[in-house]
């Protein structure tokens, strides 16, 4: 991936951009993953309740997860990989896209909007400085290895994030479509949509994940 003549500055900058992009995706990814894991826990606990209480609990649990689909400021809009697109080229595209995309804030007005625009910036700047200094202290051969590993990690993370986004979108649409049904058929619909979500390969691959 990296040629022998690749400059040290290029390696440092590349590693820095890869780290920053990975951190940017990790936050919404963890939010989706944790929401689905909570749905799984709630579903198992609901089996202890009677039918009516279970219906209520399942509806609440699905609604909490489905609401994430509407909270656009907590998510990232990342395009899917095109059919013939190289993995590394795709990662570069994601990096460039997110670097051009400002962090979205929840809709608010007045002094709240002003405060949100400044909160967190000093801390974020300190983290960036620490990361850059850490990278500058490493040997060039170590930077090459780190960049190659980060390309692979970022590619996998992006694919997992998009998979969970798809699950949340499908769950949201199914939940929305079920709202006008009477209790008895809707109870069965809620159980079915939860099972379909928890048995999907996208969730099965990450439900026991400990590293991200």
Image: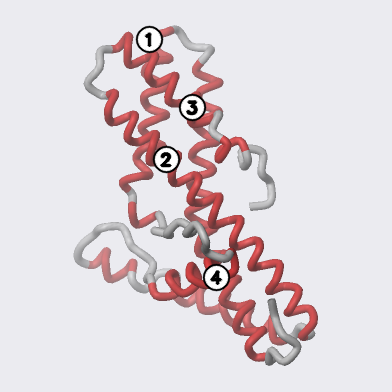
Classify residue 133 as left or right of residue 188: right
Name the residue carrying label 1.
52
- Of callouts 3 and 4, which one flags the residue occurring earlier in the amino acid sequence? 4
Instruction: Find residue 102 and report its image quarter.
Output: bottom left
Distance from the alpha carbon under mark 4 to that under mark 2: 27 Å
Task: Report x, y in % for residue 126.
Answer: 56, 78
- Tell me, yes or no, whether the two marked residues, 2 and 3, touch with CB atoms within 8 Å: no
Quadrant position of the N terminus in the picture: bottom right
Residue at point 39%, 21% (across, down): 190
Classify residue 144 as left or right of residue 15: right
Instruction: Find residue 98 and report its image quarter.
Output: bottom left
Crowding at label 1, few (<14), some or many (≥20) Cα neighbours within 10 Å? few
* Tag shown at residue 199: none
In the foreground, 74 or 169: 169
* Tag shown at residue 89: 4
Secondary element at tag 1: helix
Name the residue carrying label 3.
196
**Numbered marks: total:** 4
Which residue, as the protein is rendered here, is positioned at the far front? 84
Name the residue carrying label 2.
168
Distance from the alpha carbon under mark 1 to that under mark 2: 25 Å
Crowding at label 4, few (<14), some or many (≥20) Cα neighbours within 10 Å? few
Task: Report x, y in % for residue 88.
Answer: 59, 69
In front: label 2 or label 3: 3
Crowding at label 2, few (<14), some or many (≥20) Cα neighbours within 10 Å? many
- Tell me, yes or no, whether the two marked residues, 4 and 2, touch with CB atoms within 8 Å: no
């Amino acid at each position: 991936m990296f040629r022998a003549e690749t400059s040290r500055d290029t390696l440092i900058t590349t590693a820095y951009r890869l780290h920053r992009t990975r951190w940017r995706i990790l936050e919404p990814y963890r939010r989706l993953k944790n929401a689905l894991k909570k749905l799984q826990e709630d579903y198992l606990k609901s089996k202890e309740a009677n039918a009516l209480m279970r219906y209520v609990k399942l509806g609440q649990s699905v609604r909490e997860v489905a609401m994430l689909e509407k909270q656009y400021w907590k998510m990232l809009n990342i395009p899917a990989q095109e059919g013939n697109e190289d993995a590394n080229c795709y990662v570069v595209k994601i990096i460039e896209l997110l670097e051009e995309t400002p962090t979205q804030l929840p809709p608010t007005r007045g002094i709240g909007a002003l405060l949100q625009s400044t909160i967190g910036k000093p801390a974020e700047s300190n983290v960036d400085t620490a990361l850059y200094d850490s990278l500058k202290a490493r040997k060039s051969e170590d930077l090459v290895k780190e960049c190659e590993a980060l390309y692979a990690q970022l590619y996998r993370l992006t694919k997992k994030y998009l998979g969970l986004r798809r699950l949340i979108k499908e769950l949201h649409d199914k939940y929305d479509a079920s709202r006008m049904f009477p209790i008895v058929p809707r109870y069965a619909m809620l159980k079915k949509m939860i099972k379909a979500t928890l048995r999907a390969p996208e969730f099965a691959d990450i439900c026991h994940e400990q590293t991200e």
